[in-house]
Amino acid sequence: MTSTQSNRRHVLQAIGATGALAVAGCLGSDPQENSPDSNEPAEEEGLPAAKSVDVDQIARDPTDIPAPVDWTQPRTHDVTIRTEKVTAEIEPGVTFDYMTFEGQVPGPMLRVRRGDTVNLTFDVPEELNAAMHNMDFHAVYGPGGGADATTIAPDDDPTQIQFRAEYPGVFIYHCAIPNMDMHISSGMFGSILVEPEDGLPEVDNEFYLGQHEIYTTGEVGEDGHHGFDYEAMKREQPTYVVFNGQAYGFTEDAAGPMQANTGETARVYFANGGPNLLSSLHPIGNVWSDLYRDGDLLSDPANNVETTPVAPGTTTAGVMELPVPGPVKIVDHALSRVVHRGALGVVDVQGDPKPEIFDPDP
């Protein structure tokens, strides 16, 4: 067993996810015992050694979210977004060359109010990039969501567009050059939140997560530097399915879980960059008490939804109530992606037990 495979098993055990059935909160044996992941590695075929990394953490902090809208009249926002190719770890011992907006995955969340104007400066610095890029905002009326006007090469000057946020909701943005699937898979997507004129209901915590697939030339957990596998992408057979660019990034053995307290509420903005797979978003040990399906902020939210489909190219928002302590595990309920490919993050809820709601030892 490689050191990375051992670490993956340790991560799963540490969060109580020793198998697909255990992840779901049921009893069962560990399917990894008979899975290819736990077999002795095949003869060395020569994956390049892991590269030195440009960033310690590819995963954007899920609390890195602009403050809620507190203005009542339209504003103008000057925003600059820069693309950057960086080498980082998907998991310990496994490096990959990511393409990013502003150096992490997902790109920064933008937050405006309906009727606001955004002056966007888009830059592809030559020293940080080797490819042409652009930005397609699903919140923008206009050719390609702005992609046509923002398409530039690394040796071009920064370009500018202006758009007015005409319709409220939570929307994705992404790179949309001809091989957009490869660029999105490599990390080039993010979210823009357009709040309604009256704003959103107040919550105690907000978290920002982005799911995507990574298609690599190595196997899951294989130490070394993984190149991009175009053929696997065309077959839609990813090596990893991750949140914020990193396998099991928001667990104790990585960046650490997200934090909240009992009695609080938490709203999760969840973008599925894809480029190919639908996500089945589920909070283990909780429900989406208010679910804004497909990022629709104008309709009344659905209530107490256990699992919601999030199509590629879609951002949704769900609120959880947190009455009891313990970990809430955010997963794609296509559970093999949780157990084997990295699609899991933890919200660590701290506080006093509430045995009248949940008693683990009556």
Image: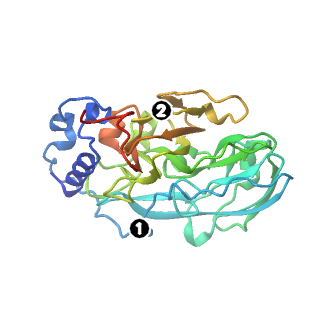
Is residue 42 rendered to the left or right of residue 344? left
The answer to whether 272 is drawn above or below residue 70 in the figure is above
Q: Which numbered disc, 2 or 1, marks the residue closer to the eye? A: 2
Residue at 69%, 59% in the rendered image: 152
- Please, what is the three-letter code of the amino acid marked with disc 2? Val
Q: Position of residue 303 (x, y in %)?
A: 57, 27
Q: Secondary structure at mark 2?
A: loop
Identify which residue, 12 or 144, lies in the foreground.
Answer: 12
Residue at 46%, 51% in the rendered image: 261
Question: Which mark sits nearer the N-terminus, 2 or 1?
Answer: 1
- Please, what is the three-letter code of the amino acid marked with disc 1? Asp
| Circle number at residue 287 | 2
Quick one: quadrant of the C terminus?
top left
Residue at the limit of the structure toward the right, as seen here: 73
**Crowding near the residue tagged with mark 2, few <14, some 14–19, many ≥20 C-alpha atoms within 10 Å:** many
Q: Which residue is mark 1?
A: 56
Between marks 2 and 1, how big is the CA–CA gap? Answer: 33 Å
Residue at 59%, 39% in the rendered image: 317
Q: Secondary structure at mark 1?
A: loop
